Image (cartoon, rainbow, N blue to C red):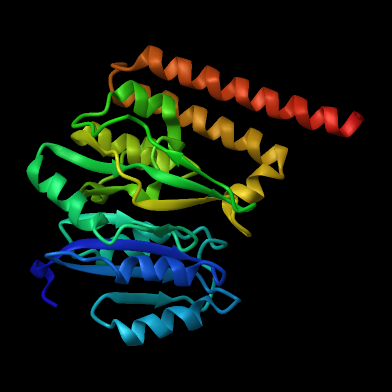
Amino acid sequence: MEQSNIVVSVICNTYNHELYIRQCLEGFVMQKASFKFEVLIHDDASTDKTVDIIREYEAQYPDIIKPIYQTENQYSKKTGIMKTFQYPRVKGKYIALCEGDDYWIDPLKLQKQVDFMEGHPNHSLCFHAHNNEYSNGKSDAIRRYSTDMIECPMEDIIMGGGGFMATNSMVYKAGIHKSYPEWVKMCPVGDLPLMLLLSTKGSVGYINEIMSCYRISSIGSWSQRMSCDIKKQIDHNSKIKRMWIAYDSYTERRYHWIIVRKILKNDWNLLKTILLHLIKIFK
């Protein structure tokens, strides 16, 4: 396919997602769109059968599934996977995200979001409602608003933090990722600064339809590992706080008091977590 023909580049990072990757890939290949899209998969040297499953779909959908198979784990080498391997091969006008342990459930997801972005050229990002799916089999419908929103308030995005929108619900303009300010690089996670950066480059729209599932604390996930380590949570909170302070300066303090409230909220949540941890120890 010619570069100009691809409208959406879907970025999917995987590592030991054998239990989930087939459902993720099915969500991609079932998409019904009036345009061409590509799925850029990066497998970070999985040690289970994730690669075997990806190869199966690559063989069946060679024009869509475009993998990189690492033989050495890049995350452990602190290599920026998105910057180094994924963003440089993006061909689409828009980027969609979906980790290998999450999945899409609406075959018209990409079509609906591209239609929205094309109809609202001043928007840098569009996201939608989603399901949070837990390891015990239960799920919650996450709707940020009761109706579609043409422009989401910045206060909601800041106070919502990285969990305000599921990464697998995002479609955003390609090109913005090519120049990251320093405060983005300071953050220990990728979803939060990406949302904040995109929201400073244009309006953010919301579609009130559940079109994806986001797994909470799936086996081997970052969130699962983080929840078991108080020291990591303290360090994480400290780094996030530094990012908020730098972001406040970057935005010329336009959202200063909202950011202050967010920092205080994060500190309070961390304190509650520490207290619960101590109670368990001395119980």
The residue lying at 30 percent from left, 69 percent from top is 30
Residue 17 falls in which quadrant of the image?
Answer: bottom right
Rendered residue at 11%/36% (across/down) = 122
The residue depicted at 71 percent of the width and 43 percent of the height is 229
Q: Residue at x 62, y 36 (%)?
A: 235
Q: Is residue 49 above or below residue 281?
A: below
All told, the count of numbered labels is 0
Specify the quadrant that holds the C terminus: top right
| Residue at the right extreme, as displayed | 283
Q: From the top left corner, tell me how far across and down residue 238 is, in percent.
A: 57, 30
Question: Considering the image in quadrants, where does the N terminus appear?
Answer: bottom left
The residue most toward the top is 257
Residue 118 left/right relative to 172: left
Expressed as whole percent of the image width and height from the top left, the position of residue 281 reads 87, 33
The one of 221 and 26 positioned closer to us in this rendering: 26
Q: Is residue 156 above or below residue 143?
A: above
In the image shown, does 174 or 221 lie closer to the viewer? 221
Question: Against 196, is 21 above or below?
Answer: below
In the displayed structure image, the side of residue 30 where residue 73 appears, left or right:
right
- The answer to whether 64 is drawn above or below residue 129 in the figure is below
Residue positioned most to the bottom = 59
Q: Is residue 59 left or right of residue 13?
A: left
Name the spot of residue 247 as percent of width and height, x first.
Answer: 36, 27
Judge left or right: residue 64 versus residue 120.
right
Residue 280: horizontal and vertical position, in percent? 84, 33
